[in-house]
Amino acid sequence: MRGDRNGILRLVRAMPAPCKRQWHKALPAPPVTGRVTPPASRLRGRRLAPLGSMATHTPHVLVTGAAGFIGSHLTERLLADGFAVTGLDNFDPFYAASEKWANLAVVRRHPRFVLHEVDCSDADALEARVARVPIDAIVHLAARAGVRPSLEDPTGYIRANVLGTQAVLDLARKRDITRIVFGSSSSVYGDSSDVPFREAMDVGAPISPYAATKRAGELLCATHAHLYGASIAALRFFTVYGPRQRPDLAIRRFATRMLDGSEIELFGDGTTSRDYTWIDDIIDGIVAALAWTQRTPGACETFNLGGRRTTTLARLVTLLESALGVRARIVGRPRQPGDVSRTWADTTKAEQHFGYAPRVRIEEGIPRFAAWMRQRVQHRATAEFQAAGLALGTR
């Protein structure tokens, strides 16, 4: 039996990539339960069983950055829509890993979800982890985010955002995966005064390392599509907010400090403005773009995903004060290098190509976010009270 097995494996290794993919789909699929695997260094030699079979194939999406703010919401939506999802995340210490594990609370035990702890810039580990997963499409969201932190560690941002993106594209090439959605950023527009921002505008003057790495990712995607015929949607996200937002982002940071009674720092005079976009609108856009890649083989386009309105920093603070029921204690600071004056999305192109239509205005979104923040504070207080009770009980 061992000789027969080795002979079969030699035949499979000699197959072209598309044939290998079909062969893997034909393997009988054992029941799969939601699970999490640690880094490859702790699981040498173990392999995962494939999802799907020739009789019933569940569309399978690889989501990088799956434990993050946007990635965790997207994973929930894809699972609800009937997809199987393999998630990747390296749990970068940029913020607490506990935040990311909490993001995955809803999906960790889902039977069509598997999470691997892996760094996308480690091409060998990336390919090993998904070697037997029959991937139909990739949504690449993994990245080091943030304009100001990128000024301190530009090399780290290049490694994560440029090399990581190329490693994902290399995986797609080797596995003949032709449907890709890439998470880009409105920061590629730089400090342009021509608003609203349109995809046809010149984006050759980014003003932060983060913005430069996102533009580099778009160019890598365009090159990949040209060479290998992939269908790629590069989505320029505009200041996404909502439940699970990263702790370093302004809305979450302001709300946390306001509820604690602490001062908040406002950089500049309050007139800088952003196109704030509710998380559900962004997820609608990603899912629609993913469907677009199936309808348009060989196409590669950039799309703005934003709220189509701009809000000043001063107005944002006023909305938070109203929603949280507290007065902000403001400390003024000079405007920071790398910050742009405004962002504002023209979403006409996304509307025309796949029906993108943001629905949640910031006047509605901020109260929703505030409700989530209050719930979070209550849960934390309850946990601390219970922990204190346990501590007293052990004395």
Image (cartoon, rainbow, N blue to C red):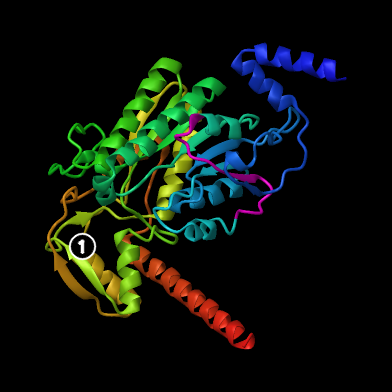
Residue at 44% x, 21% y is 298
Q: Is residue 85 visible?
A: no
Prevailing secondary structure of the magenta residues: loop
Magenta-drawn stretch contains 116: yes
Q: Position of residue 157 (x, y in %)?
A: 33, 40
The answer to which quarter of the image holds residue 276 is: bottom left
Specify the amino acid type for callout 1. Answer: Leu
Magenta stretch bounds: 107-123
Residue at the far front in the pictured view: 395
Left or right: 48 with respect to 252?
right
Count of numbered circles on the image: 1
The residue singled out by tag 1 in the image is 313
Q: Is residue 146 visible?
A: yes
**Relative height, residue 386 to residue 32 (above, below):** below
Residue at the far right in the pictured view: 1
The front one of 172 and 126 is: 126
The front one of 238 and 50 is: 50
Residue at 46% x, 51% y is 68
Residue at 28% x, 75% y is 321
**Relative height, residue 177 to residue 264 (above, below):** above
Quadrant housing the C terminus: bottom right
**Relative height, residue 327 to residue 366 (above, below):** below
Q: Secondary structure at mark 1?
A: helix
Left or right: 213 with respect to 270?
right
Q: Position of residue 129 (x, y in %)?
A: 59, 35
